[in-house]
Image (cartoon, helix red, strand yellow):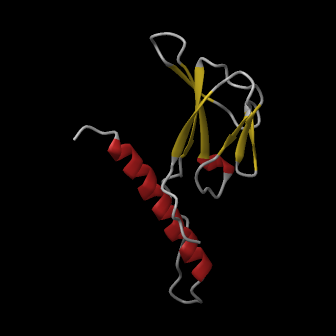
Amino acid sequence: MSLSDLDVKKFYQGDGSNDTFAIPFDYTNTSEVVVIERDESSSTIVETTKTLTTHYTIVGANVVMVDAPASTTKLLIKRANPKTQALDLIGTGELQVESVEESLDKLTRLVQELGEQLTRAPK
């Protein structure tokens, strides 16, 4: 598959009633989706990483929160790929094109995530 979408994260403003939020990026496993609730009700912002199945579920391309985020909070949905390489190419055998493409897609997602972090770094 090709990866044309550059989004790796999205903020949503809570309103106390909406509990469903679109995931704006491609992912291959639900473990790659991270949900963080940011309480902005005071001068000190408190971030809480939410837990899959305890605080939210993933249905299709949506995060569905168990409790709708309050209007004083923002919800951050971001992709976090593991920095691992699982493909093992063996010199004596048939090249598995699909496996190579999946690995290249993962590398592209990692580069997108690092690129997003670099845009926020002081230069």
Quadrant (top left, top right, bottom left, bottom right) of the N terminus = bottom right
Residue at 73 percent across and 35 percent down: it is 56
Residue sitting nearer the eye, 42 or 54: 42
Residue at 33 percent across and 46 percent down: it is 118
Quadrant (top left, top right, bottom left, bottom right) of the C terminus = top left
Residue at 64 percent across and 58 percent down: it is 28
Q: Quadrant of residue 62?
A: top right
Residue at 57 percent across and 70 percent down: it is 102
Q: Residue furthest left?
A: 123
Residue sitting nearer the eye, 102 or 65: 65
The x, y position of residue 105, in whole percent, is 53, 66
Residue 59 against residue 102 in the figure, above or below: above
Q: Quadrant of residue 96?
A: bottom right
In the visual, does 106 lie left or right of 62? Answer: left
Residue 52 against residue 48 in the figure, above or below: below
In the visual, does 41 lie left or right of 50? Answer: left
**Number of marks in the image?**
0
The x, y position of residue 19, in whole percent, is 74, 32
Residue sitting nearer the eye, 82 or 70: 70
